[in-house]
Amino acid sequence: MWVAEFIYLVRHEIISPDAILRSHIRYFWTLQVARNITGQQPVRTFVDDSSGIVIEFELGHTAYIPRRTMVYGQTTSPTENRNNPSFFALGVLFQPLAIKELFGIDAHELTDRRIHLDEFSKLPFTGMISAVHSMPEVIQLLSDYLVGKIAAVKKQDMPILHCTRYIKGRAGSVTVKELCAIYQVSERQLERKFLSAIGVTPRHYIKITRFKAALALLSARSFDKFSDIAYHLNYFDQAHFIRQTKELSGLSPRQLQHQLNIRVANIFL
């Protein structure tokens, strides 16, 4: 759907992956932004719990010609980009353990990094994508590549998978000490496993999970006061909630709530 604002138009779509991909891929997404340079809003990203692929296409062509492609890892700080007033992009949002399991590298090697898709995959994706003529074909091309990667996965790291699900089920209201007791590991062992499998420490993952629960409440306007959100999600107090929101999004809760009307993956406008 198209969303009209004072200075820009946005079209975005979430595409569910085939069933075989869902263990490692949350969804595909597209985002098209057309707006004036004057008075432009930056494109922001908040800190998320997932890695992924982003392909940005050159505008004004009938073919889908990639201008920039990247595989990105976990992020630990928000970003802001004012250089692209208009763009069209396709993304793949991974499940938290996908980098380690699909590509066989320790996830922390990619944390806060971006690598060209061709270099990362050792395949000429730029040329392959330029040769197709529709977005469904681009998505199918990526799907076929990822299906091949999933077929080669020998086993999932079930303890860490269960641990991440437990953290999500508690909306981040859990401590590292509690996790260590549940899964019978030392804090050092748990940290090492999280860095390898996901790319960040369990403490950081807990913080991200609680922040995302707060995002959902802010977006739904479930509470009238930010202090109620802080209490509901077991922040120490409202000041703690505001501080962590700024740390992970670059905005205050009030500013963030105004920006959440247009959001896809970890991008908001």
Image: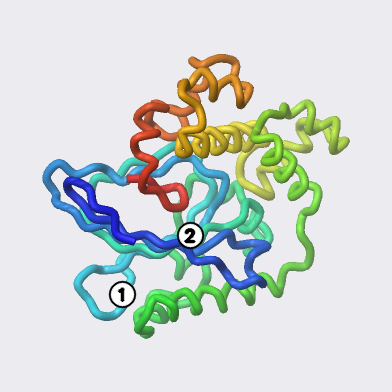
Q: How many C-alpha atoms fall within 10 Å of the one at disc 2: few (<14), some, or many (≥20)?
A: many
Q: Which residue is under mark 1?
A: 65
Give me the residue at 51% from left, 74% from top: 142
Q: Helix or strand or loop: what does disc 1 sit on?
A: loop
* Amino acid type at mark 1: Ile
Q: Which residue is under mark 2?
A: 71
Describe residue 193's horizontal placement relative to residue 250 as left or right. Answer: right
Give me the residue at 59% from left, 62% from top: 25
Give me the residue at 29% from left, 80% from top: 63
In the rendered view, would you say 176 is above or below 42? above
Mark 1 or mark 2: whose residue is earlier in sequence: 1
Asked whether residue 69 appears in the rendered view, the answer is no
* Amino acid type at mark 2: Val
Asked whether residue 75 appears in the rendered view, the answer is yes
Give me the residue at 42% from left, 38% from top: 78
Quadrant that contains the C terminus: top left
Q: CA distance from mark 1 to mark 2?
A: 17 Å
Q: Helix or strand or loop: what does disc 2 sit on?
A: strand
**Residue 235, position in %: x, y?**
59, 21
- Looking at the image, which is closer to me, 108 or 262? 262
Rendering quarter of residue 135:
bottom left
**Residue 52, position in %: x, y?**
51, 57
* Direction left: furthest residue: 38
* Direction right: furthest residue: 184
In the rendered view, would you say 78 is above or below 262? above
**Residue 176, position in %: x, y?**
73, 29
In the rendered view, would you say 125 is above or below 105? below
Question: Residue 143 got which mark?
Answer: none
Q: How is this picture coloured?
A: rainbow
Quadrant that contains the N terminus: bottom left
**Residue 255, position in %: x, y?**
35, 30
